Amino acid sequence: MEEKIRRIRELIRIINEAGKAYYQEDREIMSNYEYDALYDELAALEKETGVVLAGSPTQNVGYEVLSELPKEAHESPMLSLNKTKSVDELREWLGNQRGLLSWKMDGLTVVLTYERGTLTKAVTRGNGEIGEVITNNARVFANVPLNIAYKGQLVLRGEAVIRYSDFEKINEEIADADARYKNPRNLCSGSVRQLNNEITAKRNVHFFAFFLVRAEGVDFSNSREKQFLWLREQGFETVEWKAVTADTLSEAVRGFAEAVEANDVPSDGLVLLYDDIAYGESLGRTAKFPRDSIAFKWADEIQETTLSYIEWSPSRTGLINPVAVFEPVELEGTTVSRASVHNISIMEGLELGKGDRITVYKANMIIPQIADNLTRSGVKDIPKNCPVCGGATEIRDVGGIKTLYCTNPDCQAKKIKSFALFASRDALNIDGLSEATLEKFIGAGFIHEYSDMFHLDRHREEIVEMEGFGEKSYEKLTAAAKKASVTTLPRLVYGLGIAGIGLANAKMLCRHFGYDFEAMRRASAEELTEVDGIGGVLADAWTGFFADEKNNGIVDRLLKELTIEKEEEESGDQPFAGMTFVITGSVERFANRKELQAFIESKGGKATGSVTSKTTYLINNDKASSSSKNKKAKELGIPIISEEDFMKLLEEKQG
């Protein structure tokens, strides 16, 4: 008995640490499979011994409230759902009742209250007892009705989620790969609980109703399904559901399983709810679970295979991530041969070594994970040198998690951002060479400097075999590189990533030096500061870059791969010739500031990023703004004009 209680204490510590890392610190120290197995072991021991200790995750519901948002107690506790992975158990639970089967969405549960047809309150689930008041944020959800036809008091629960498609768009706009969000659930949780609802509004949060708590005076004929239909009539989007009986349940579960891959709404299973409201309520609840509904988690398809080796994949932060490469297996209809192991601590927990027999699965039927190591030969051969640069590595312990790092500050893997800039649309524009692809290619040793991007043909065989690639992807990428090799000098100059030299400055430099790159390269700081928009800091950055022999070698090798098209001197209508503009604030007539900048340049003007004595006009639709650029313009006596003033100026110049 004492031994079992010791195990209970140990399990509580391990599970709570994993929960804290996952929910509060956005870290993952074990797989979902391991977490579920430990949780189930704890629940079984508590049932066997009758001992339930304070702090047990089987008794805690949800996350702890940590933000500065106002807090409010729920009228009645919001409980977790009991769960099963067995369709037979699900069928037995349903019995001869009619049920509603729906997605178990993976976001943040929110309770909405409407009074006299108006949204008056929104509270998160919080820890089940106390939630956070997020009314202002809920008002800017993408699909929540602010007013409804029903004028009585309405209280309903639903899930706030960020769709996969929106999640990917948000991440694409973040240049730094390490700063990107790890999954839609974490992004949604942070978005819903913002102190500034302007941020929430930009995240395109959606709300899907899944339970009606109260709607005074409405007869639903004792049917949850009729509640769902009524909520739709009020303008709410509800969770997708299917009415089932014990006879149709298996087919319905199979239908949802087949839809997982194409489902744009994050989910981690299904929920089965009794349609009969009175029957469900008559069952009451346990201390932790309601008895009118149950969660179904996918029974993971597990395959046994052999670990071929651990691939060590460096990133821009210096972190070297272990990736398990194993003999290919079929999982959930696709062939899988790789799974992230995340860090050395997880490797040590699995005692993972080359040649081990392992079991693998797809978490939520999507992400490949290692379930268990059957032979446990032990961790060995942690590289002492970085696989990209050969620099020394070191193992660091951060918060109890062991990770491997490259110590070389000049490691190519740490320069992904500069390579991504070079390949970006405004620079060389190598379509398809994203940061994610660059990270793979640099990690594999295909790219060490800019010129290597034009010789991917040297690695054709390896590329077509890489996950996510094939012959077609390879052909498209090499064709894009060939097309990009014919470029212009401003694009090249911008693509070199010299600190502070944006596209507008690159264009000005090229014009000033007559598109003579060698003259630009040899220019002194004094010569450079004669160019509009180039001050002492930018001049020093430029001369410092070309004072480095290594940089010059990289540029020389790059130039051999490029054909620089001669820029045609601007001719014709140049009403803004000799004028310099700075743009700040939001624009209305143009799609964005970049479009306005291009328009100015097409009319012979220059657009710079900072206000100086050489600035002719500052364009800002908010002339009364207290921004630093407005203040600087006023100090220097530079006129501040709106877009409307700008267009009038153009008419005058052309008139």
Image: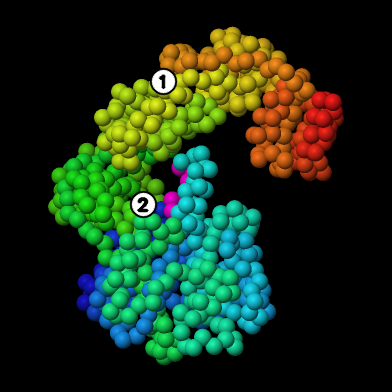
Q: How is the image coloured?
A: rainbow
Q: Tell which of 252 and 468 is nearer to you.
A: 252
Residue at x-position 27% and y-position 45%: 338
Q: How far across and how far down the image is residue 624, in percent?
A: 82, 43
- Residue 209's tag is none
Residue at x-position 35% and y-position 77%: 244
Magenta stretch mostly in which secondary structure? loop
Q: Tell which of 351 and 35 is nearer to you.
A: 35
Judge from the rendering whether residue 554 lies leftward or rightward of residue 308; answer left or right: right
* Secondary structure at numbered mark 1: helix
- Residue range in magenta is 178-183
* Secondary structure at numbered mark 2: loop
**Badge 1 or badge 2: first in the primary sequence:** 2
Task: Report the amino acid beneath label 2.
Answer: Gly
Residue at x-position 31% and y-position 69%: 253
Quadrant placement of the N terminus: bottom left
Location of mark 1 (residue): 451
Task: Report the amino acid beneath label 1.
Answer: Ser
Compared to 266, does 597 lie above or below?
Answer: above
Q: CA distance from mark 1 to mark 2?
A: 41 Å
Find out whether the residues at labels 1 and 2 contact each other: C-beta distance under 8 Å: no
- Residue 330 magenta-highlighted: no
Residue at x-position 77% and y-position 38%: 643
Judge from the rendering whether residue 145 lies leftward or rightward of residue 9; answer left or right: right
Location of mark 2 (residue): 400
Please indicate, yes or no, whether residue 4 appears anywhere in the rendered image. yes
Classify 10 Å Cα crowding around label 2: few (below 14), some (14-19), many (20 and above). few
Quadrant placement of the C terminus: top right
Q: How far across and how far down the image is residue 471, in percent?
A: 30, 34
Classify 10 Å Cα crowding around label 1: few (below 14), some (14-19), many (20 and above). some
